Amino acid sequence: MALAPKIDCLLQSEIELSNYDAIAISFAKGEIELEIENPKFVKAVEKYFGLNLTELLKKWPEATGKAGELLEVPADAEGTKLSRIYFVGVGTATPEELRKAGVALSRKVKNSGAKVLNAIVTTKEGARSHLVALVLAGYSWGLKSAPAKELKAASFDLVGNFAKELASAQIFATGVWRARDLIHTPSNIKNPQWIANQAKSLVAKVKSPALKLEIKSGAALTKFGGLLAVGNSSPKPGPRLIQISYAPKGSKNWPHVVLVGKGITFDTGGVSLKRPYDTMVGMKSDMSGAAAVLATVVAIAEMGSSAPKVRITGLLMCAENALSSTSQRPSDVITHFGGTTVEVINTDAEGRLVLADGLAYADAKLNPDYLVDIATLTGSATLGLGRQYAAMYTRDLSLAQSFYDAGQSCGERVWHMPLIDDYKIALASEVADFNHTAEKPDFNGGSITAALFLEHFAGKRTWVHLDIAGPARSESDSGENPKGGTGFGVRLLTEWLTSL
């Protein structure tokens, strides 16, 4: 398991070059030739090594300076451990390109224990994106009994006065790292009770009087028909509703945001068993929405006095969708919180059943100003958007814009999708208020009809549904993301909350 890289920032006057293993310097393509950024710092490095870095860079005429390009130059200096210079391309140095530069550098020294002096960022714009990327690109998870070699966390000292950006980056990166740890934990360890215990541990660690935790199980879930229908397929330990609340002193009149996260700790599909079977391998990540909600609420609490003036309630709807003698069946009719009845058509569409209870409970009992749900809900969401964007559904155009802007800023992008009322007829049932899969007639809009189903349970609230089935999981180490769960949603929700 990787250790999180350490990040800090230093003014140039505080730097002693001999303390570092490597130096990272940014470069880009000028009008005529490659150009090194940060000239003041470069002069100090050139004097230290007795080199002309501009002339040195000319030895790579094929270099383009595009974001993420990395050139490694041996540069031993007598009497020092400093042995490497990394030229890292930054393109036009936008936040997105600085993020790519951070990924390239972080992956280069991952788990090496290297101490790197990082002079890639020259302005405050994009500094946070770069710093977050340095941490997240170093992530990995594993349970090998004997690692091939001892792993040591790399560390990065950013040259410049970036204290504010560093503080924000640490909140974001820590939140995503936590969510990834939850997601990557295998399901023979992770069940609803385990998630509850992790929530207890995080709340205890933060030691914030603004945080409160309540865990509902057993008889306390009697009215939560969707959560019970799914979770009773694995009665030991059974489902859990984990409610984490952030309400600082004096926050009674602040806007109240309720975040509802899908927490399916493993999804076999139930009686409607997944085909082909290998699609189950990634299903330990089907609680990514709940992980994002938990990590976000804790991250906001850790901001302390700089936290946004908003009250937050997180609802983690946790269950395992197993195949057993107590599994729900296709044709079952269940009664959700609040009394709506639903005909179950396909037990592999379980996420919307647990979310429906959470939304209905929030609407009836918590009086939210904003109601947001987040879930790895439908494969359909990936058909049009791939794995780079989450599907976002809301009828509030202003709210959609604020989520879009937050996503563009933090690197977790969303696309506003339509709620098409003409498709609602597919939710009709002859025996219940609704069916939950909207298969007849087939509009080929599975993510849309799932959102239309959930919208009913949100009542008249200002509501957003985030279908993160695409970006929540990566099939390879790519960019900031490891193979497996990405922790998508933590940065998006945190960024949006801080904008309120």
Image: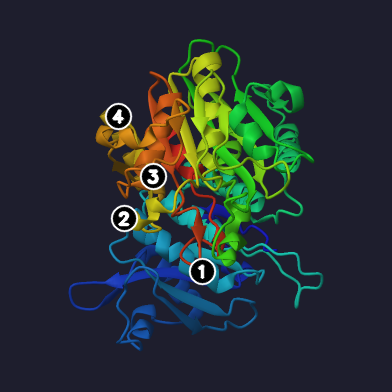
User: In the depicted view, which residue is nearer to us: 259 or 175?
Assistant: 259
Disc 1: which residue: 476
Disc 2: which residue: 384
User: In the depicted view, which residue is nearer to us: 80 or 252?
Assistant: 252
- Residue 26 location (% of width, % of height): 39, 68
Labels 1, 4: front one: 4
Quadrant assignment, res 147: bottom right
Q: Upstream in the sequence, badge 4 or badge 3?
A: 4
Q: Upstream in the sequence, badge 1 or badge 4?
A: 4
The answer, for residue 500, to whether it is visible in the render is no
Image mark for residue 395: 4
Q: Residue furthest front?
A: 430
Callout 4: helix, strand or loop? loop
Looking at the picture, which amino acid does disc 3 mark?
Glu
Q: Residue furthest right?
A: 145
Q: Quadrant of the N terminus?
A: bottom right
Asked whether, in this view, residue 336 is left or right of residue 403, the answer is: right
Q: Is residue 446 above or below residue 225?
A: below
